[in-house]
């Protein structure tokens, strides 16, 4: 039973394997940038998870995970952060290979601005909820830096990948929250859920995905110079 959380954490890695066999999505030296990007994203969000636990925002069920932790946060969560970021990057690459057109990129800034407005609204109305605060503050920073500081343009493809990533997200995170492997204190949430998953967690994964894709595109751009 101690391997339940580990099995769920590793499950998303099946997607990169399937996509690589089918479409060779990590050709031309793009595998290392993808691993590096997913690792950076995982480390940052694992640090945030440690802070949330330190603030007593989150807790974890014992007995279904390994007896290995990072500052009392099960190591499986860090593995899940990496595997899901890498799986989402693989979905991003697969869709780019299969549907290379970027015709809707001009609409992505409007969507990003809507999300920035949503972040501000949540921060204003739910600033006393620590999980909500962590989530939308992180997404606000990531969105602002990508759209208004960074020069790389990929957001339409990123949003497309996020929508497809919701399929494995609901499977893996649905089980995680349903089995209470990962618990967020109700007092630290906005109170909105989808299939027992806090609405905030959707935006956590979006921020994690956007950061991973940005770092992936950044590494590729540096390699091309």
Image (spheres, rainbow, N blue to C red):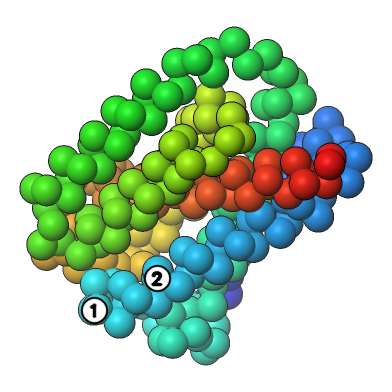
Q: Nearer the viewer, residue 17 or 35?
A: 35
- From the viewer's perspective, tell me whether residue 4 is left or right of residue 204: right
Determine the CA span between mark 2 and mark 1.
11 Å
Q: Residue at x 46, y 35 (%)?
A: 147
Image spot of residue 169 (x, y percent) = 48, 45
Which label is found at residue 49?
2
Judge whether 35 appears above or below 144 on screen.
Answer: below
Judge whether 45 appears above or below 23 on screen.
Answer: below
Q: Which residue is mark 1?
A: 56
The local crowd at label 1, few if under 14, some if 14 to 19, many if 20 or more residues have their Cα within 10 Å, is: few
Between discs 2 and 1, the one toward the N terminus:
2
- From the viewer's perspective, tell me whether residue 24 is left or right of residue 111: right
Residue furthest to the top: 103
- From the viewer's perspective, tell me whether residue 165 is left or right of residue 37: left
Q: Nearer the viewer, residue 195 or 169?
A: 169
Pointers 2 and 1 in contact (CB under 8 A)?
no
Image spot of residue 48 (x, y percent) = 40, 69
Image spot of residue 84 (x, y percent) = 57, 53
Q: Which image quadrant is residue 8 in?
A: bottom right
Q: Which image quadrant is residue 38 in?
A: bottom right
- For numbered disc 2, what is the local secondary structure? helix
Residue furthest to the right: 28
| Residue 35, visible in the rendered structure | yes
Q: Residue at x 29, y 60 (%)?
A: 134
Q: Nearer the viewer, residue 71 or 115?
A: 115
Q: Residue at x 75, y 41 (%)?
A: 221
The image quadrant where one finds the C terminus is top right
Q: Residue at x 8, y 48 (%)?
A: 125
Q: Nearer the viewer, residue 62 or 80?
A: 80
Judge whether 119 appears above or below 109 on screen.
Answer: below
């Amino acid at each position: 039973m101690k391997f339940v959380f580990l099995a769920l954490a590793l499950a998303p890695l099946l997607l990169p394997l399937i996509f690589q066999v089918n479409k060779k999505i990590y050709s031309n030296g793009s595998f290392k940038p993808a691993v590096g990007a997913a690792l950076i994203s995982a480390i940052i969000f694992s640090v945030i998870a440690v802070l949330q636990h330190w603030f007593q925002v989150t807790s974890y069920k014992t007995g279904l995970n390994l007896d290995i932790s990072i500052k009392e946060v099960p190591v499986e969560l860090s593995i899940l952060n990496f595997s899901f970021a890498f799986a989402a990057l693989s979905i991003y690459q697969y869709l780019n290979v299969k549907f290379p057109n970027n015709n809707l990129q001009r609409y992505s800034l409007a969507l990003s601005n809507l999300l920035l407005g949503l972040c501000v609204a949540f921060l204003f109305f739910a600033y006393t909820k620590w999980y909500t605060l962590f989530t939308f503050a992180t997404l606000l920073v990531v969105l602002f830096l990508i759209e208004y500081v960074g020069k790389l343009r990929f957001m339409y493809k990123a949003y497309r990948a996020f929508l497809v990533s919701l399929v494995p997200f609901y499977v893996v995170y649905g089980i995680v929250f349903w089995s209470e492997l990962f618990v967020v204190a109700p007092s630290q949430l906005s109170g909105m859920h989808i299939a027992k998953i806090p609405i905030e967690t959707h935006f956590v994964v979006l921020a994690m995905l956007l950061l991973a894709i940005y770092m992936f595109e950044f590494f590729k751009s540096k390699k091309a110079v």
